[in-house]
Image (tube, rainbow, N blue to C red):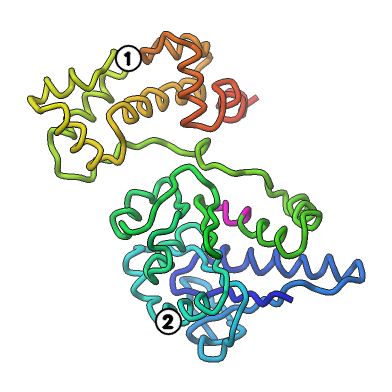
């Protein structure tokens, strides 16, 4: 039997504590109904037995002092000022580090990665982070390698997930690992969780990173965003800003985490996505509107950035289709 400790962090999102407890507990119930032994022992672990979390009061099964060794640690999502919340939960850090060094696996749910990164255990490792929080995470934890498009990452006994409800897919991964594929599929059907989600790309909204002090780069970003239909070149932008190409490219990548070509592509594709969502324009017309003329190249870039083909994207997100 696998012992699971769900941490009751201060300012944790309640659903990310209760949902894993419910899913693991339901697996045990399903197995017992078939005359089989339960697989998981689940405990809520806090610094105190009663934890007041916003409007919720959570009763923990064990305090950190009472908790012994565990097989799997679940780190829930946190909210309300991530840097402050990380500091408020610092007393969990020594226990988490000790457990990991003694062989425990750690499953970190969405924004819980901000807490886990504070332990140092993610340094040098690949990590999935919600696309909207990735820039802030990189600033706080530059030693961690953020994988932008992955829904779930697993490396050296640590699982991370990006996206608010993608933690359900991470829990399914653990259920499949320890209770089998058949049970994971059964749970996905019972709780209506899309089991095969692998990428954040279809959900990502590109918002150009402008939280920096490099004014020429900001001017270049604004120019790209206001002239996306034109043929924009690195040489043209660097000349416009009176910067050497090499210096401009280096500064742009440092400030935005994108090359100039990547940034331009993302801006153009974001415009096309909006068109697919809200208009009846053909894919070809939308492609021409943002300056693409090669349909094959356009489809390749679109799928690279969204994980879907243009028609798949329209079928999934079109407002008119949703309203019909």
Q: In the figure, is residue 309 to the left or right of 225?
A: right
Q: Which quadrant would the C terminus be assigned to in this image?
A: top right
* Secondary structure at numbered mark 1: loop
Q: Position of residue 93 (x, y in %)?
A: 42, 77
Image vertical order of residue 199 relative to residue 116, above or below:
above
Q: Which residues are magenta?
A: 165-169
**Quarter assignment of residue 118:** bottom left
Residue at mark 2: 94
For the point 50% across and 22% down, the residue is 300
Nearest to N terminus: mark 2 or mark 1: 2
Cα–Cα gap, marks 2 and 1: 53 Å
Residue farthest left in this picture: 242
- Which residue is under mark 1? 229
Which residue: 36% across, 63% down? Answer: 82
Q: Secondary structure at mark 2?
A: helix
- The location of residue 19, given as percent across then percent down, is 63, 63
Between 156 and 238, which is closer to the camera in this rendering? Answer: 156
Q: Is residue 45 magenta?
A: no
Q: Position of residue 268 (x, y in %)?
A: 37, 22
Q: Residue furthest right?
A: 35
Q: Which of the pair 274/266 is nearer the observer?
A: 266
Q: Is residue 303 left or right of residue 172?
A: left
Residue visible at 50% across and 87% down?
Answer: 48
Q: Quarter-wise, where is residue 117 in the image?
A: bottom left
Residue at position x 80%, y 73% in the image: 38
- Crowdedness of circle 2 by 10 Å Cα count: few (<14), some, many (20+)? few
Say left or right for 170 vs 201: right
Badge 1: residue crowd in 10 Å (few <14, some 14–19, many ≥20): some
Where is residue 75? Give x, y as percent. 52, 68
Is 179 located above or below residue 99 in the figure? above
């Amino acid at each position: 039997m696998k012992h699971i400790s769900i941490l009751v962090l201060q300012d944790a999102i309640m659903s990310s504590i209760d949902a894993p407890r419910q899913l693991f507990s339901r697996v045990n119930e399903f197995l017992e109904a078939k005359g089989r032994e339960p697989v998981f022992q689940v405990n809520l672990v806090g610094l105190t037995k009663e934890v007041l979390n916003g409007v919720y009061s959570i009763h923990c099964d064990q305090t950190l002092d009472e908790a012994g060794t565990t097989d799997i640690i679940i780190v829930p999502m946190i909210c309300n000022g991530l840097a402050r919340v990380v500091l408020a939960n610092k007393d969990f850090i020594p226990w988490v580090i000790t457990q990991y060094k003694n062989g425990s696996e750690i499953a970190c749910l969405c924004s819980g990665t901000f807490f886990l990164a504070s332990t140092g255990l993610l340094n040098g490792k690949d990590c999935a982070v919600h696309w909207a929080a990735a820039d802030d995470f990189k600033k706080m934890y530059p030693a961690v390698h953020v994988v932008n498009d992955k829904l779930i990452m697993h490396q050296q006994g640590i699982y991370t997930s990006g996206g608010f409800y993608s933690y359900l897919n991470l829990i399914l991964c653990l259920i499949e690992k320890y209770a089998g594929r058949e049970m994971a599929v059964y749970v996905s059907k019972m709780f209506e969780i899309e089991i095969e989600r692998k990428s954040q790309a279809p959900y990502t909204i590109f918002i150009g990173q402008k939280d920096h002090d490099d004014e020429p780069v900001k001017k270049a970003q604004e120019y790209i965003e206001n002239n996306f239909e034109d043929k924009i070149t690195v040489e043209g932008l660097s000349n416009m800003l009176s910067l050497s190409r090499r210096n401009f490219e280096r500064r742009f990548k440092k400030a935005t985490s994108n090359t100039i070509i990547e940034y331009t592509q993302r801006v153009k594709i974001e415009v096309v996505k909006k068109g697919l969502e809200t208009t009846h324009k053909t894919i070809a017309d939308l492609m021409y509107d943002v300056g693409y003329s090669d349909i094959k190249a356009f489809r390749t870039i679109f799928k690279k950035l969204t994980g879907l083909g243009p028609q798949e994207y329209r079928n999934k997100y079109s407002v008119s289709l949703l309203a019909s």
